[in-house]
Every structure is written in C-alpha cells, then in structure tokens.
Image (spheres, coloured by chain):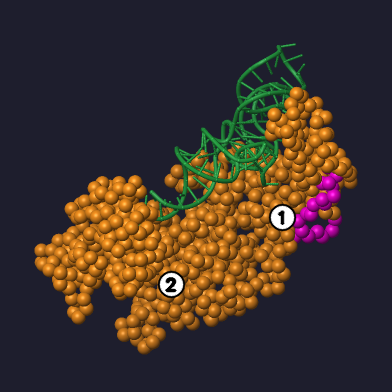
Chain colours: A orange, B green
Amino acid sequence: MAEIGKYDHAPIERKWREWWAKEKIYQPSLKSAAKPFYNLMMFPYPSAEGLHVGNVYAFTGADIYGRYMRMKGFNVFEPIGLDGFGIHSENYAIKIGKHPKEQAKVSEARFYEQLSNIGNGFAWDNRLETYHPEYYKWTQWLFIQMFKRSLAYRKTARVNWCPSCKTVLADEQVVGGICERCKSQTTFKELPQWFFKITAYADRLLEEIEGLKWPKKIKTAQRQWIGRKAGINIHYPIVNEQGTRINEGRQELEVVCFTTRPDTNFGATFVVIGPEHQLVGEIAAKVSPRERKEIEKYVVQAMAKTENERITEGRAKTGVFTGCYALNRLNDYRIPIYISDFVLGQVGTGAVVGVPGHDLRDFQFAQEKKLPVIRVVVGSDGDKSAITKESQVQEKEGQMINSDFLNGLEINEAIEKMMVHHEAKGWGERVFNYHLRDWLISRQRYWGAPIPMVECPKCGWQAVPEVELPIRLPDLVDWQPKGDGRGPLDNAPEEWLYTKCPVCGGKAKRETDVCDTFLDSSWYFLAYPNLQTPEWHGQEQPFNLEIMKKWLPVDAYIGGAEHAVLHLLYSRFVWKFLSDQELLPFKDKPEPFPFLYGHGLIIKEGAKMSKSRGNVVIPDEYMSRYGVDALRLYLMFLGPYDQGGDFKDTGIRGMKRFLDRLWQLLAAEPEETETNEALNSKLMETIIKVDQDLAHFRFNTAIAALMELVNVWKASGKMGRSEKLGVVKLLAPLAPFMAEEWYQRLAGSGRVESVHRQSFPQADEQIIKAKDLVVVVQVNGKLRATLALPPQSQWDESSLSARAKEEVKVRRWLEGKTIQRTVVIQPTPKRQGLVNFVVD
RNA sequence: GCCAAAGUGGCGGAAUGGUAGACGCGCUGGUCUCAAAAACCAGUGGUCCUUAACAGACCGUGUGGGUUCGACUCCCACCUUUGGCACCA
C-alpha cells in the first residue's frame, strides 16, 4: 500500500469498524470469560436530534478506561442501550407532533448509528431499549415484587404536579419548585398515587454510602438528600381556653412536634401545624363556627399556593389561630396552636413547637402574631437580656437560662437531659427524622410501562398475575396528556381497560397510570448481561444467578453528577431490595456500584449547552472533518475528565496535527534502525506515565505524555519496529482507529489479532536507568544550576555537594558566604536529586 | 443560611514539599505560494540590565500571615467563583 502523508481517517474508520463488528472483538463470553470486568456507562435518553458532544465526552472517557482494562488482561463487558421510555422522550414526541412509538424507531436508528461511529468497544449483542415489551415486562415484574412485599402502596397525597408535563412528579424531580424535565413551575395536586417505600431503606442507604468509592460530592449530595437527623417527638395534650382536655371520641387529642432542640422547650410560646395536618379537621370541629370559618379560609388559600408563590411572598409569615392550646407539661403553660404554611406537611410530624428566641422563622411568626419571646440560651457575648431583634440564630453552643432544671448546662448536655426527661415521663420518644420521602411512581402519561395493577370493586387493588406480563402499552391514537389527573390510558379500549380480578374472577379495571421513567433505569444494568439467558425469556424472574454473580456488582460506573440523587439512589434501593428478597444473590454485596467515576460537563462558550441557547454541538461534523480519533483526543485533552470543559473548534486541529505527525513518524523508513537510547528511554517513561494516567482517568496528561514522546521522536531520531508497536499500543485506548491501522501494518503479514486484544506494553526499567541523573543545585532555596551526571557514577552526600560547588554559577553565589547547612537528596533514575546550600 | 469543591500566562491546563507554567490552543516572525489557507521552522509569564548577542538579575501560582533549608502544594484568617441543599423544625 502506498504511504499516505496524512491520516485519511474516513476509509480507515470504516474498515476497522466493520472488522471489529464482524470479529466481535468487544463481545466477551458472559458465561465463561475469565477476569470479568463490567465497564458501565450511564445510558442516554434519545430525546433530541441525536447524540450531542456531551454524550460523546462521557462515552469516550468511559471507553478509554474499558479499552485500557481490556489491554490489562480483563474481559471487559461494555454494553449500551437506550433509556427511551418515559417523559423526556414523550415530551420530544409531543413537540415534533409524532407518536412516541414512531419517534422511538427514528431515534433508535439515529442513536445507534452515531453510537457505532464514536469508536466505542460496545458489546452490541447486549443492547437494550427500555420501551420494548421484552424489557418492560420485567420493570412491571419489579413493581409486583415491591407490591408483594408491601413496599409498593397506594395513597392519596398532596403531590408535586407539573402543569406543563401534566403529570405528578417525585420530590427528586422537582428542583426548587421547578420541574426537572421542562423547567416549568410546579404546583400541588391531591391525587391517589402509587409509592415505593424507599424510606424503609433510608438507614441502609445512608450508612452504606460509607464504603463507596465515589466522588465525595455525590456521596455528600446523597447524605444530604437522605437527611437523617436525630431528635425527639414531643407529645402535647390539646386543651381549650379553660385548660380542659379536648376529646375526639374516647381519645384525647394531642399534637406531636418533632424537634432536634428539646433543650429550648422552656422557651416555647406557640405551636404551629401545617395546613394539610390531619388535626386541622379535628380541631375545626371543636371550635366556634367563626373560628372554623377562619381556619377553612386560610387552609384553602395556603393549599392553593405554589412553592414559588410562597418564595416570592418573601417568606412573610401568615397564619390563623385555631382556638386551641397545647399544654407544655414542663411548666404547665398553655401555648396557642396556629395553622401556618411555613410548616410543611411532609416534614417531621407536620407540626412544630415555636421557640422564637432561638429560631429566625419562629421569631418572625411571633412578631407577626404578637407572641412572647423568651431567651433560654445566653448569647455568645454573655447577653442575658430579652430578645427583641431578628439578630439571633440557633446557637450551637452556650449556656441555658430561664429553663428550670436545665439552667447553667451547656446546650448538648441540656438536649440529652431533656430527652431523658421526656422519655422517663412518657411525654416523647427519640426518633430520626429524614429528608427522604417515599418514591412516587405513578405518572399520568402514555409513554411508560403500565403499572401492572387492577382494581376490583370487591377485592380492592390486586397485582396482575406474573404469567400475564407484560401488560402491553396499547396503541392509542389519542395519547396526549390531558392534565385532569388521569392518564391517557384511561381512554384505552374497553378490552384493554377491563380484565378479570385475579382473586374473584369478577370484572376489574386496570390502573391507567404508567411507571416513572426512573423505574426503568433503576435496574437496566442488571438486565444487560441476561439478555441471552433462558431466564430472561422465561416467566419466573429475569436474572441468571450464575451470570449475575460473575459480572456484578458493576466494576466501574461512569456517568454525570446530575444523577446524584435520582438514578443512583433509586438503583441502590432496588439492588438492596432484590438482594433482600434473594432475587439477586448479593446479600454480602450491599452496593451495585462500588466504584463510580463522575465525569464533568462539556459547555460551550461558558454556558451549558441547550437547544434554547442554540449552542448544542453536534459531533458528527467534527467526526467527519477531523476523524473520530481526533475528536476523542480533543475532548479528553480539554482538562481533567472529572471537570469537563469548554468546547472550542480550534483545539481539535491541534489533535489532528498531532495524529498526522505521528502518522509520518510511523510511516518513516527504515524500520529496522535501532532506536537511540534517549528516545528509547523516553518511550519507557511514557509507558509508565500513560499506564498510571489511564488507570486513574487522567486522560489529559496521558495524551500530553504521548505528545512529548512524539516531539522527542521527531527531533531525535528513528524508531525500530518493535518500539513503534509499543507506541501504537499506548495509543490504542485513546485513538483506536489509527492504532489498529498501524498495528496491522507493522505487525506483519498473515492473520493478525486486533491491537485492542493485545496486552498493554511494559516498561523496561533498565533502559531508563541508562539515562543521565539530574541534580538541581540551590543556594538558599533558589535555583542556581542543574547538573547532569553519568548514570553509573556513585555519589554520596559529600561528593555530590563538592561536585555542586564546582559549578561556576554556584561558586559565584557562594563567594564570601559561609555555608551553614547543606541539604542533599540523592538522585535516582526516576527522581531528580537536589543540593541546597544554606548560607548566611 | 448550611455543606462541598476550586482560584496558576492571552486561553485550556501541568507540577510524590524540591527546575512553576509540561502539553496544547492562540499570538509574533520566518519558509513555501502570484496570493491566501493548510503545513513546516523559530519564538512566546512580567519587569529590568546590556549597542547587541552570549548571558544575567529581580518579581511572579486570589489576599494577608505562619511552618520549612525550600511552599502552587502543608497550617490559620480573609476575598472571590462554582456546585449541592434550603421556611427541614
């Protein structure tokens, strides 16, 4: 073949892509592979025009790591799929006016074509799409397993509602009152919904974060989201104006308040319950008609507010007095009970005890309602006077005051004493409060897995028999969301909508909501290795336990930090649940992703890429213009992989130049020339450097090291064939196409295995040892000379400092000075030496 | 407000407590060309000294202190930026 001066990427890429696919070089034997390594990347959702450069960034880094591990002797399994079921894909279909099922076919073709172009070593036989009945059959199965263990339950609740997406959302999917998906303001709706009881796993989800090798940031985000706090639930009897207890039937009413600070309880001057609190109704029934009217008016107003309205009101405190009092049994004070929307129904017990002296919100409320303020902690400046301004914070240390038997104690002692006191009296019990709430699964949408439940008028809610799975999503013409709180499936044909009750055989109606898309993605990584097993195609359960044991947990999970509290939390929950039920064989392995690498975000001109800004970079153009290898190198060279970077067109040309230079050097004759020592030594150093860098996802410095090698090579000589092969292997994980081309050209005639099945080069340390030793000479810590010493020579401290003193420049700086001290570090081939003269 | 991370040339960034700015982009000059692009070669932190060159001096990693023979790196305080959580009791 005639040598081409430049790397002409298009035909080469095509050639090797086809060959790799034909030879299935990236397809490990799932049953019998030795040293299995599950290299997983978060699968994309195909909602827009196609893969954008951010996806390519994510997949390239992950793939380099996978290729590196393969060359390190592992059988790497690197599957890919599409998260194409759910609200994001459906919203895109609505936008372009196409049926989601039709659009899915188009997106699928487009994504798989792009994904095959980016040069990843995917195991194509194991791809999956979450919208295929074959897949969502098992999503529905998972729902039923939860239901069978009472971890899926139905409850009418005030839930987040997105008026634009026309569906309810989980708490995790609402960020600051804004829909995570479409960025509209969310409101609330009272609807019967299916929940997964993820809170039952809160403690394990929190505690088992500890052993994870994850980015600190993501671990912290999960801890904060779970938000466990130790405190006490204090029970206050409810009394009327005259101080007599109020009864509901035979039961005496009480209000329970959660607090982390029972030490301040002598400073309590009111109790506030949220507008959705169940006591609201009970109290309203006991008070005068006028008060009842006030209460009802306020509750209606408060419930209608959106989260955003509450914020824009400037957090002004509003509220209404109930006419009832809570009895503080510590001092027999009757403290008034108010209803206010600054207390959230889902937090703690939905009721708080107001201590206005030591909490800003309580203080504001007390000011508004003219309630007394009592100081119970001495100020940090020793202030013991009455609190009159908003200046106070919740002190974390200080001495108690005005608090009877707590007086003089430090806060922490007081908390403990108060806890003990309440427990002893039976007035309260220690509890943990969590920020985490149960996972809302229902969605009033079309494009999702139908929830596999039926409602029988006689037998109530029943799970569909597992043999009937999948419950297929019916083809609907009128599939768009209505916004009336019922899903589009409510308009499905009668034959779909009505079925037999699995218990009594009578007529029963199917659930018409579909599953949250995060349920689809909570277990996809468990599915990939099973796609060829009889279990997957059977009816019992989807997992072949032998294969699961071999390949899971996932060895390396690579993805973005945007899923810190969504997907990653749900997946951990599902894994723990399935293991507990022995549906997965991992009782001894508490986590699905022991190692997670969070890659950074690619931005464009300092801004996040988005269609509305019009700055989305589509990779195809760059791939065809500069080649996949150049694009991969460019993206990885932007900076540390966990930091992302700003995409600029000019940088990619530098990568093309680098590849062209390397091409010329590889093509240079004669190939049998001995490689010179300096170049050979540089090669060995590069091998060590690239090896370590790739192992730690430091792709930018690995590429820089290869560039240095090429610069030295170009400046200083020729390289023999076996050394060239070494360079090509170093390049292989980063630029797989060009590496394959040159491996095949250099490896000789006959059938040659792919470079991607070769082992990673090993450095010959002897060659590095032949290099000159470097010694840096300083005077008072300032660099004055560098020495290059022959490698064989032996230097002890005194001969080394004597040698250093001989240097002209050093001598000049030592002239007329007395050496107080000399610091000497011996040079080694891997590390420079040092002589530092400390003079007066 | 709470928690976390980060501040280095014109830009992206590199540096187990030991030559700060590797590598790349950009820029400047040159080669090639009718010309341009591309490519290739050389230079490129700042200030100063020297007619100039060779060379040399001082300053320099957000700010101010500290530890050390020696600090981008470790410690303390502050400033700034980014990310997460947030009327969370």
Chain identity of mark 2: A
Residue position for label 2: A200
Q: CA distance from mark 2 to mark 1?
A: 51 Å
Q: Position of residue A303 (x, y in %)?
A: 25, 60
- Label 2 or label 1, whichever comes before in sequence order: 1
Tag nearer the camera, 2 or 1: 2
Q: Residue at x 51, y 57 (%)?
A: A218
Q: Amino acid at mark 2?
A: Ala
Image coordinates for residue A21, horizontal then vertical, percent: 69, 61
Please indicate whether residue A402 sits to the left or right of residue A720 in the image: left
Q: Is residue B83 shown above or below A29? A: above
x and y, in percent, of residue A185 in the image: 34, 53
Provide the residue designation for mark 1.
A16
Does mark 1 fall on the same chain as mark 2?
A: yes
Principal SS element in the magenta part? loop
Instruction: Residue A756: say if magenta.
Output: yes
As displayed, is residue A830 above or below residue A583? above
The answer to which of A600 and A743 lies nearer the viewer is: A600
- Could you say which quadrant of the image residue A549 lies in? bottom right
* Chain where mark 1 sits: A
Q: Is residue A297 above or below residue A802?
A: below
Q: Please state the extent of the stretch shown in magenta in the rendering.
A: A749-771
Badge number at residue A49? none
Q: Nearer the viewer, residue A181 or A358?
A: A358
| Vertical side of A68 occupied by A421: above or below | below
- Choose between A602 and A13: the one closer to the eye: A602
Image quadrant where residue A492 sits:
bottom left
Q: Secondary structure at mark 1?
A: helix
Q: Are marks 2 and 1 in contact (CB under 8 Å)?
A: no
